[in-house]
Structure formats: C-alpha cells, structure tokens
Image (cartoon, coloured by chain):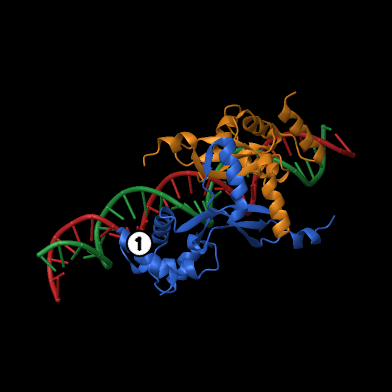
Chain colours: A orange, B blue, C red, D green
Amino acid sequence: MSHHDEIIEALQQIGYRLTPQRMMILDAIASSDGHTGAEEIHEAARAAYPYLDISTVYRTLDLLKGLHLVSETDLGRGHAQYELLSRGLHHHLICRECGGILDMDNSFLNPLRQSIDQQYDFHSEIEHLAIFGMCSACNANLPG
Amino acid sequence: MSHHDEIIEALQQIGYRLTPQRMMILDAIASSDGHTGAEEIHEAARAAYPYLDISTVYRTLDLLKGLHLVSETDLGRGHAQYELLSRGLHHHLICRECGGILDMDNSFLNPLRQSIDQQYDFHSEIEHLAIFGMCSACNANLPG
DNA sequence: ACCACAAATGCTACTTGTTGGCAAGTGCAA
DNA sequence: TTGCACTTGCCAACAAGTAGCATTTGTGGT
C-alpha cells in the first residue's frame, strides 16, 4: 500500500468520504515531481477519469490544506502550487534568471524562528517558503 | 519637497515622463500606511483624478517594481500588496488569527541569507517576506 | 512659443485562477 | 437496501491582472 493510500484511509477515519475523485487527485499530487498547480493536477487525474471537474480539484485541495496534508505556495507564477507535506518540510530557492528551483532544508529556518519568537513574541508557522534570488550558474553567466 | 517627489524627479532623470498620473499614484502609495493593493491605490488616486484607469496603476507599479522603488508581496489575500522600498527594508509577520501585521527588521534575515549562500551557493534577494503565524495575544486567548 | 514624436494614457475586451450555488449522484452507517 | 448528509459536476460569476489600440501628452529641439 502506497503512502497516499494511508492518507486516504486516515481521511476516512476523521469522517470524510473516500471517493474515487479524492483518490485520483491525491494520486496525481503524489506522482508529481513536487510542486504542482491545480490545473496540472486536474489534467493528470483526468487521464483516469475524464469527468473530473476542476472545482472538485480545488475543493479537495482546500480540504487537504485544512488538514495540513498538502501545502499551498505562491511561487510567483500567478497560480498556487501544491505539494504533499508528508515528504518532509522543505522550502524553495527560486532563481529569477533560469527559473530553477532548489529545495532548502527546513532546519535552515530554525535560527530565524527562534529569533522571531524571542524578539517579537510571534510564533511563526513557516510551512512552505519561497525565496527568490540568483543561482550560482546564472550568477556566473551574468554580463557585467 | 516630500520624499516621493524626489523619486518622481529621479524617474525623470532616467528618461521617464513625469505625468500627473504617476505622481498621484506615488502619492497614494506614500500616504498609505504601508502595504496597499492596486485597487486601493486606484481608489485613493481617483479622489484626485477620477479618470485614472486601473491599468495605468498596474503599469506604473510595474515600472516602480522594475526600478526597485516599490516592492510587491503576496500576503495571502488573493492580490499583491505594494509598498515603498525607500522606507527601509522590512518584512511582515502576519497573524493567522487576528490578521494583525508586525514589521520585522531586515537584519533578522542576515543569518539565513548567509547560510543559504554558503550551503546552496544561492544569492537570495529577499526584498519583502511574509511570514504567517500566531501573535502572542492570540496565542494566549486560544482555547485548549 | 511651437512642433514633432515617442511615451503614456484610457478604454475596452479578454485571459486566467478561483469560488459559489444548486440539482443530481453516491459513500456509508444503520 | 434504504436514507441522508456529504460530494460531485455543471455553470455562472468573480477578481486580479494583461493586451491591443486609438488618442493624448510630456519633452527635447528649434
């Protein structure tokens, strides 16, 4: 049994229905290579079930977001990107030049979390952060 | 002469036209209390000049973004928020409960910047960051 | 003060991502 | 197997943002 099947069954325990649509949507998210847009998920799941509607995708994503099973991030592309949170927390370094995305380990944020907590008495919940900048390759190739 | 007038004149030096629309838009951003949406800017500037179009607002914001005079941030409200960068770099701690916003000093990010640079060889350009979480007041009032 | 022209504006229509209402369908507990 | 609340598909609406284009307007040169 694959990982997201467990998630689905867990959903059922909490009182949500186990519908084929939800399974297919989770399948699509899980089999994507990481961050996926709603439309992409829709397309992928439609391969298995052509009548799946985009609003069902959004509703399911809302549900999974609320349960902290998937994260929603705006990677600056005009649409949100979704990702399974069970893969372990990590964040993204996005190159403005080439658009490449590096995964940054979650532990890098611990010092920041601590200092924010101390200084501002604010408990940050940084689930999924997107940091823009310039990767080394593009930095080297840049004129000037 | 107020601060944003200097900005406007600087614009002119670089070769951009000094139009009343641009002045009013900058006025609106400057006289806002911080982060403002495009529609809000539009409304404010329209008080002075009713024919100002929203697309002019967007075009001007694009221009100012490109020149790093204003920053654009997605504070998770479905639309971007704009802010004068000349006020000094800072970032935002946004409470999920009450919606309150704390300003966080830019220097707090320096350790993170350094470690990202060292570990990932990635030069981050964190102009304006939004961190969600829970402020102390809401944390105290929370049931459970 | 005037002219010419590129830059900028306003208008309109459009795209794209996302949400809402509602009737029909369907898991699931009894 | 039946009932019913939960879900779905459909469709229409929505908001933010963008594009095209004719008209207007700063601005530098005269």
Residue B107 sits above or below residue A139 on the image: below
Q: Is residue C2 left or right of residue B27?
A: left
Splitting the image into 4 quarters, where does residue A50 fall? top right
Name, please, the residue furthest toward the top.
A1
Q: Residue at x 44, y 55 (%)?
A: B68
Splitting the image into 4 quarters, where does residue C9 fall? bottom left
Quadrant of the rendering where the N terminus of chain A is positioned:
top right
Residue A121 in percent (x, y) is at 73, 59
Number of marks in the rendered image: 1
Q: Amino acid at mark 1?
A: Leu
| A35 and A55: which is toward the camera | A35
Q: Residue at x 72, y 25 (%)?
A: A2
| B142 and B83: which is toward the camera | B83
Residue B57 sits above or below residue A112 on the image: below
- In which chain is the residue bearing label 1? B
Quadrant of the rendering where the C terminus of chain A is positioned:
top left
Residue A122 in percent (x, y) is at 71, 57
Whether residue A25 is visible = yes
Residue B115 in percent (x, y) is at 61, 41
Whether residue B22 is visible = no
Q: Which residue is mark 1?
A: B11
Q: Secondary structure at mark 1?
A: helix
Residue C4 in percent (x, y) is at 14, 60
Q: Residue at x 38, y 60 (%)?
A: B56
| B49 and D5: which is toward the camera | B49
Residues packed near mark 1 inside 10 Å, few (<14), some (14 to 19) or many (20 plus) = some
| B102 and D6: which is toward the camera | B102
